[in-house]
Image (tube, helix red, strand yellow):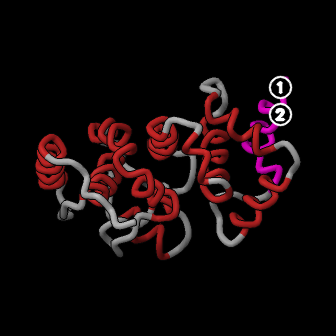
Amino acid sequence: MTASQELANKLVTDAYGPIFYWPQHDQTIDKIWSEPGNAARLEALLDDRSAPLRARLIAAEVLMRKDFSFLDRHDAEGVARIYAAALAKHQTNANVWGLLWINDTDGPLGATFAMLEAAAIPALRELLDDATLVTWYEGSEEATLGNRARFRVKDFAAFYLARIVRQPIAFHEDFASRDAEIAKLVDELDHARPASRAP
């Protein structure tokens, strides 16, 4: 077993502590990063398609917070695909992806797509056909609000895409109206570039 595989096993079993639960999340990120040799192992995990998705997601999260320059050495579209797959495949609770239209938030993980900007568009577009209902919000108030909204994976993707290209997208209770909004967004994506951001 390689060093990066050993690290992957530790990440998926929460050996460093709870992840994606705050405030413990930040402490766990610090523990992972501070272990000698982990910086290189984390980057190796990013490129290891045979590694567990959750391990690759955690690796990306640690690097996002501790060494943003890793994007100079790795394909940003590939990193976005890790996040998109994690969203679609229920690798975390839904809370970290935000409550979307409920309070206009994209959550700590959803915000990564906006940081990646245009590089995130291909991965998010691939989710626009995924009608899986996201019913894995946790807690009391957030679980009630989030699960009651009947957000689908495609709704998350559309919300993030709209932020990247700075196009408004309205929320509707019924799925048909949401899909009509998504269709309009796709048309915008096909005819416009993401707005440039101020330095």
* Numbered range of the magenta stretch: 1-16
User: x, y percentage for residue 44?
Assistant: 70, 33
Does the stretch in magenta take in 8?
yes
Q: Amino acid at mark 2?
A: Glu
- Residue 93 location, quadrant: bottom right
Residue 17 vs residue 191: left or right? right
Specify the quadrant that holds the N terminus.
top right
Q: CA distance from mark 2 to mark 1?
A: 6 Å
The foreground one among 56 and 44 is: 44
The foreground one among 113 and 196 is: 196
Q: Secondary structure at mark 2?
A: helix
Q: Dominant secondary structure of the magenta stretch? A: helix
Q: Please tell me which residue is depicted at 54% across the width and 64% down the height of the picture.
A: 138
Q: Secondary structure at mark 1?
A: loop
The answer to whether residue 40 shows anywhere in this view is yes
Q: What is the residue that sits farthest to the right in this orientation?
A: 36
Q: Which residue is mark 1?
A: 2
Residue 60 vs residue 87: left or right? right
Residue 53 vs residue 113: left or right? right
User: x, y percentage for residue 170?
Assistant: 18, 64
| CB contact under 8 Å: marks 2 and 1 | yes
